[in-house]
Amino acid sequence: MDLFADALWQFFETGRADLWIEREDGYLRREDVAWYFTTARDFPAHERAALEFARGRVLDIGCGAGRHALALHRRGLRVTALDLSPRIVELARARGVQDARVANACRALPFRDGEFDTTILFGNNLGLGGTLPKLRALLRELHRVTSPRGRILATTRQPSTTNPAHRAYLQQNSARGRAPGQLRLRLIFDRARGAWFDLLLLAPTELMQIAAKEKWELARVFPLENFEAGYAVVMEKTKSRKEKTRRGKI
C-alpha cells in the first residue's frame, strides 16, 4: 500500500502519476489514478446506482482519496472512512473527509455492534481479503457492526472467461487449487515494485451463495455492459421467516 499512497499523493500534488498493476503471470495494466479523484457525476454507472441505497450512518472501507465519503457528505450523510494506510488516511483528511481512520478491514473492526446502517466496499474492495475464507469473515464482521436494516454496497467483477489471457490464468488457478478469481498482484510505481497481494473477483452466483451463508442476501445487482466489466451489488441482512411474514413477503 505504500506505493499506492505514493501514487495518490503524487497525483494530488501534480495531477499525474504512472501506476501499474502486474499479475503474477506477467500481465500488466496501467491504473488510471485520476479515477480515485472523481466526483459523483463522474462515478461509473454501477456505483451511482448502488449509492442511491446509502442511508443512515455509513462506513466506507478502503476509502482511498475519499471520493465516495465526500460525495455522501454532500448528501448530508455521516460517513466514517477507513483505510489500511496512514498516508492514504492523511490524504483523505487533506481532501476534506471529516472522519477518516486507519484500520484493517480484514481483522476485527473497532466499532460497536450495530453502529452503521450502510457499508461501502467500492473499487473491488469486496475482495480485498484475497480469499474466500477472508471474504466470509469480513461479511460476518460487517453483519456485526451494522444495524438490523444494515446494507452493504459493493463492487466486484466476474473473472473473465472471454479474454484468452485471463482465461488461461483462471485455468492455472484452478489447477493449483485456488479460487478461479483469486488474483495475485503487485503495484509498480516510480520503478519500485510492491509486495504481492491477493484480490478476489467473484461471479454474481458465487457471491450470492457466499453471502447467504453469512446472512446477507443480494437485493439489487447493477452490471456495467457485462459482469466481466464489473457490477455493483446492494446486500441486505437476511430476514427471518417471522419478519417476512410480518411484512407480507410470505
Image (spheres, helix red, strand yellow):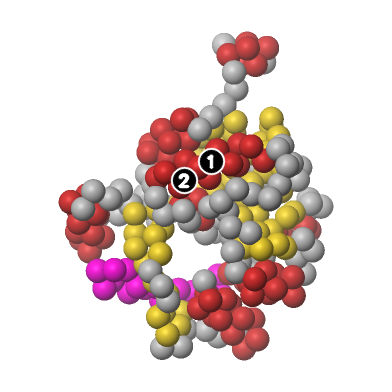
Residue 135: which numbered mark, if any? 2
Give the left or right position of residue 150, taking residue 168 as reference. Answer: right
- Report if residue 8 is visible in the image: yes
* x then y, percent, for residue 234: 57, 40
User: How many dots with numbers?
Assistant: 2
Q: Residue at x 69, y 32 (%)?
A: 149
User: Which image quadrant: the C terminus?
Assistant: top right
**Bounds of the magenta span?**
20-35
Q: Residue 64: within the magenta?
A: no
* x then y, percent, for residue 172: 20, 56
- Label 2: how many Cα within 10 Å (few below 14, some 14–19, many 20+): many
- Label 1: how many Cα within 10 Å (few below 14, some 14–19, many 20+): many
Front residue of 92/86: it is: 86
- Report if residue 63 is visible in the image: no
Q: Which residue is mark 1?
A: 139
Disc 1 to disc 2: CB gap under 8 Å: yes
Give the left or right position of residue 165, taking residue 2 as reference. Answer: left
219 up-or-down from 90: above or below: above
Front residue of 244/211: it is: 211
Front residue of 40/187: it is: 187
Give the left or right position of residue 200, taking residue 93 as reference. Answer: left
- Three-letter amino acid code at disc 1? Leu
- Three-letter amino acid code at disc 2? Leu
* x then y, percent, for residue 99: 77, 61
Front residue of 18/173: it is: 173
